[in-house]
Amino acid sequence: MNPSRGSAASQTMQMYLYRRALHPELFPLKGRKTISHGAYELEAWIMPGCHVMRFRHKEFTCSELLIDHEDNLPLEGAVTGFPCSGEHEFQHAFLAERVEYSTSVQTETLSDNLYRSTYEDMLDYAKQTDSLTYKYLDGEGRKCLSLLDLQQLPKEVHCQSFHLLASSGFVLRTQTIFGHK
């Protein structure tokens, strides 16, 4: 770990949970994927270093937003928000709607060599899992990656995200489960 890198990225990355749908016109979408099974649907949107996941069960919708800024975000329907730094876990039950949400966030700051190796490993992983990916260059022309891997189960969907930011060697991994009873 390189302590001189990554502090800006980890201070600006934020995770939010909403008790409502978020709308695509609010975000610079670079890709989307939808999966449906029985009574639920999940729509995932990928952006540079960020994502939105919208989970619908019957008439109820909740959304997870991982974003790199705090300004101009919708406040209506926000359940929680927290910075993505170190390790963090959060669970929430929407009791009346019989929907459960849990997420785990992990961050690391890597050396240049380890970052490049991790970037290549994640590209291989994305091909093997048919993950939604967005490759882009940062302001200095360095390779960055956002990846969403969605796994559909009968009553829940498992969502893994990886966001790799080259300027700081910052790697953010989330593991989220949306489920219904």
Image (cartoon, grey):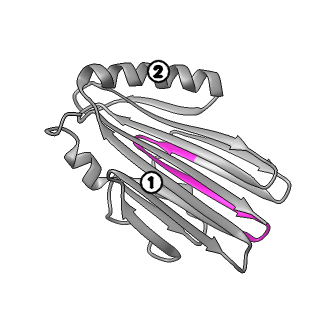
Confirm whether the magenta stretch covers residue 42: no
Name the outermost residue toward the right: 38
Instruction: Find residue 27 and report its horizontal and vertical position in percent.
Output: 46, 53
Residue at image x 46%, y 71%?
80
Q: In this picture, which residue range is highlighted in magenta?
A: 45-60
CA distance for labels 2 and 1 = 22 Å
Residue 133 in the image: above or below residue 82 = above
Residue 179, quarter of the rendered image? bottom right
Q: Is residue 39 left or right of residue 126?
A: right
Note whether residue 70 is visible: yes
Secondary structure state at the residue bearing disc 1: strand
Residue 114 in the image: above or below residue 151 = above
Disc on the earlier residue, 2 or 1: 1
Q: Are marks 2 and 1 in contact (CB under 8 Å)?
A: no
Residue 34, quarter of the rendered image? top right
Q: Which residue is mark 2?
A: 121
Instruction: Find residue 145 and report its horizontal and vertical position in percent.
Output: 42, 31
Instruction: Find residue 102 and report its horizontal and vertical position in percent.
Output: 57, 60
Q: Which residue is mark 1?
A: 66
Residue at image x 53%, y 59%?
64
Quarter that holds the N terminus: top left
Type of amino acid at the residue the image marks with label 1: Leu
**Within 10 angstroms of label 1, few (less than 14), some, or many (20 or more) residues?**
many
Note whether residue 25 is visible: no
Instruction: Out of 103 and 168, give the one closest to the viewer.
Output: 103
